[in-house]
Amino acid sequence: MNQVIQHPATVDERLAELERQFAELRDRVLRLTPVKKDWQSTFGMMPDDELSREAERLGREWRESCREP
């Protein structure tokens, strides 16, 4: 990223350049990637033990208590 940055003429062009640079920095330095949020990627992450079954039971009870009567 050791390049000479020439400032574009308009505010829109400058903003577009800043957004491009920010995206490049984010991708290079932070290496952020979107998190895949679906049940297949989380299925089986918790072991099948007493603690996990208790957490599942409590979660189910809480969800059921939030439902409208």
Image (cartoon, rainbow, N blue to C red):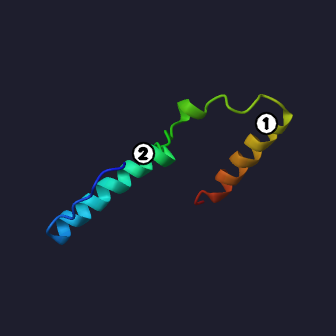
* Relative to 25, 13 lies left or right: left
Residue 64's label in the rendered image is none
Q: Amino acid at mark 1?
A: Arg
Q: Earlier in the sequence, mark 1 or mark 2?
A: 2
* Relative to 66, 37 lies left or right: left
The answer to which image quadrant residue 67 occupies is bottom right
The answer to which image quadrant residue 6 occupies is bottom left
Q: Where residue 43 sits: x, y (%)?
A: 61, 30
Q: Amino acid at mark 2?
A: Asp
Q: Where residue 3 sits: x, y (%)?
A: 30, 51
Residue 27's label in the rendered image is 2
Tag nearer the camera, 1 or 2: 2
Residue found at the very far bottom of the displayed protein: 11
Quarter of the image for the C terminus: give it.
Answer: bottom right
Q: Marks 1 and 2, how far apart in space?
A: 39 Å
Q: Is residue 19 above or below residue 12?
A: above
Question: Disc 1 marks which residue?
Answer: 53
Going 49% across and 39% down the picture, which residue do you hit?
36
* Relative to 32, 3 lies left or right: left
Going 58% across and 60% down the picture, which residue do you hit?
68
Judge by depth and name the residue closer to the eye, 53 or 32.
32
**Neighbour tally class for label 2: few under 14, some 14-19, many 20 plus, Cα within 10 Å:** few
Q: Is residue 1 above or below residue 18?
A: above
Judge by depth and name the residue closer to the eye, 7 or 44.
7
